Image: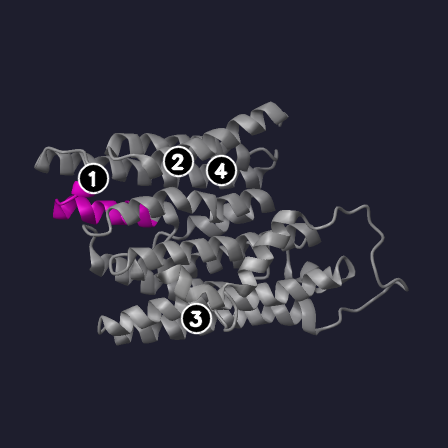
Amino acid sequence: MSPLTTMLLLFSLGMGTTLTMTSHHWLMAWIGLEINTLAIIPIISKQHHPRATEATTKYFLTQAAASALILFSSTMNAWATGTWDISQMTNPTATTLLTTALAMKLGLAPMHLWLPEVLQGSTMNTALIITTWQKLAPMSLIYLTANNLSPTILLLTGILSSLVGGWGGLNQTQTRKLMAYSSIAHLGWMATIATMMPNILILTLMTYILMTTTMFMTLTTTKSKTLQDMAMAWTTSPTLTSISLLTLLSLGGLPPLTGFMPKWLILEELTLQNLTPTATTLAMSTLLSLFFYLRLTYVTTLTMAPNTTPTKHKWRFKTPPSKLLTTTTTTTLFLLPLTPLLTS
């Protein structure tokens, strides 16, 4: 793909998300989502491979169906209330449809089945875009309509997503699928808190994006696509494997790392709202996710893979880790002390 085409697609990707995030009219928000979807499709399918084509088709069909549902729900609301304002979504049927459509857009369970398959058919960088940037537009719509969305549906999909994200990742050996199930579990936490404390939703989304970016960039730098690749990653960069250990523990939500902050705040808020069973279920589901994170850290850092060559380090013409990785690693690991500042 030529640099000009890549620049045009990335610009469209950014413009679509920005349009959705800044619009007050449902049609403008929908147009932004459509521009976003149409821009990412060539990016996913740029490798000429049947798996990439399959991933593109699955992504297009799910996103198109979700966009149609969003348009249908907003039309139904406009028919009932006479307004296209995003914040005036008051029709009960329309809000239920909208909640379902946004869950499908994000990849929340039980509409999650497309996400692992699409990530597996994409390159690492494309998978990074899908799991981070592509979540911003639907999440902004959830934030804007949080007062009117159905709390019951969001709580149920949130609990189900955190459980599915934990169970689904247990048996995976592909790092992209592991990150897909990790994404589903984190989105479950966000959906659970969305109607109660939208500010915590934004904080959780930001920390999730930082942690996922760090992990994907680590995987890209070490060229690790499977657990077996991770076992040999230390030969590329021993320092980077140590950083990946801490990043995975942060994704798992262990203190004193950044990932503990959103989980702590969400559990605290759920307990204050007398939703103790929900908080307990979410906390228990995190143990499932933590298990596969720990398995990944064990394979990467705590064991020595069999060596068939006398040299310890690979001789490669490799680029050093980028400045972005340095920045995101710092924020992934050390933001917990700033919790009072971020939540005030």
Picture disc at residue 286: 3
Does residue 209 appear in this view? yes
Label 1, on which residue? 73
Picture disc at residue 309: none
Read off the magenta span.
86-103
Crowding at mark 4 (Cα within 10 Å: few <14, some 14-19, many 20+):
many
Identity, as a three-letter code, of the amino acid under mark 1: Ser
Crowding at mark 2 (Cα within 10 Å: few <14, some 14-19, many 20+):
some
Between discs 1 and 4, the one toward the N terminus:
4
- Distance between mark 2 and mark 4 Cα atoms: 23 Å
User: Who is closer to the viewer here, 310 or 250?
Assistant: 250
- Distance between mark 3 and mark 4 Cα atoms: 30 Å
Label 4 secondary element: helix
Which is more foreground, mark 3 or mark 4?
A: 3
Identity, as a three-letter code, of the amino acid under mark 2: Thr
Q: Residue at x 50, y 72 (%)?
A: 254
Label 2, on which residue? 18
Between discs 3 and 4, the one toward the N terminus:
4
Label 4, on which residue? 56
Label 2 secondary element: helix
